[in-house]
Amino acid sequence: MADRIPLIVNASANQIQELPTSDSLQLNDTNQIKLGSDDDFSVFHDGSNGSLNLSTGSLTVRVTDTNGKGFFVEDPNGGSPETIAKFEKDATTGKGRCELMFEGAKKFETTSTGVTITGNQHIAGALTVTGDITAFSSSDATLKENLVPISNALNKVGIITGYTYKWKTEGTDYAGVHGTEDTGVVAQDVELLGLPGITTTRENGIKAISYKRLTPILIQAIKELKKENDDLKTLIKDSSSFQNLRTSL
């Protein structure tokens, strides 16, 4: 009796039959298996499609092969209801896809070309990208104040040295690049410039550089170099004019 399921086969006659463990419990289509009195856990089949629903009142987990065919996590109080996550077989492409939602808005989606993430992202750990990163940084003048040109930029550039080198990162968080050759500068040199936001020290003590913030220094250094060159041209021109004047006299 311990490993058999009792099944009422004739309630009016009060007859009970034991269902052998080798047999299946079969219900007709459109009949449901329900646990509890609030329909919070049910298994259902309508002849073509089936579903499994588990609801806590604040969260519903639904596995179904209808309306998208997949695994859904929903907020039953958020609308009709509001979907939190989808893991499904796309009805158009027939391929598996995933969506994560926040307050009704799609934030994460797998597509035929990769992954689409909407909104601001925060990554607590390291991000390693083998392909290109394409982005625009907000730089509108209306968002900035106390604009001060970088002074002595040419001298600052002189502090920095460009290197080719080989990474020695074995046993660190950056072991993935160990032994590879690269081109760059040294954070300790850049730190000596004393400019805000250009270097940082991570929690593990490793210094890092914002390479994009080197660009303003190089721009100012080129402008200073151009001014020196223009001043030198003017001096030579004035000197030549002076010599011509002396000769004519």
Image: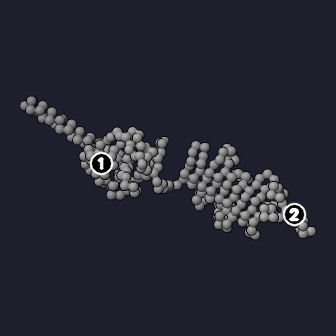
- Which residue corresponds to the image point at 31% horizontal and 53% vertical from the top-left? 195
SS type, badge 1 = helix
SS type, badge 2 = strand
Report x, y in % for residue 117.
Answer: 54, 51
Which quadrant is the N terminus positioned in?
bottom right
Which three-letter amino acid code belongs to the residue tagged 1?
Asp
Report x, y in % for residue 223.
Answer: 28, 43
Seen from the viewer's position, the closer of residues 53 and 242 is 53
Report x, y in % for residue 205.
Answer: 37, 55
Q: Please tell me whether mark 1 or mark 2 is closer to you in this view.
A: 2
For marks 1 and 2, the one nearer the N-term is 2
Q: Which mark is residue 142?
A: none
Decide if residue 182 is on the left or right side of residue 86: left
Inspect this view and state whether residue 149 appears.
no
Q: Of all residues shown, which one is farthest toward the top?
A: 247
Seen from the viewer's position, the closer of residues 241 and 112 is 112
Report x, y in % for residue 216.
Answer: 34, 47
- Which residue corresponds to the image point at 41% horizontal and 46% vertical from the top-left? 170
- Which residue corresponds to the image point at 61% horizontal and 53% vertical from the top-left? 99
Seen from the viewer's position, the closer of residues 54 and 113 is 54
Q: How is the image coloured?
A: one colour
Total numbered badges shown on the rendered structure: 2
Which quadrant is the C terminus positioned in?
top left
Q: Is residue 88 above or below residue 59?
A: above
Inspect this view and state whether residue 94 appears.
yes
Q: Which residue is mark 1?
A: 189
Which three-letter amino acid code belongs to the residue tagged 2?
Gln
Q: Which mark is residue 17?
A: 2
- Which residue corresponds to the image point at 50% horizontal and 55% vertical from the top-left? 120
Mark 2 burial class by Cα count in 10 Å: few <14, some 14-19, many 20+: few
Q: Is residue 244 above or below residue 75?
A: above
Decide if residue 68 is on the left or right side of residue 180: right
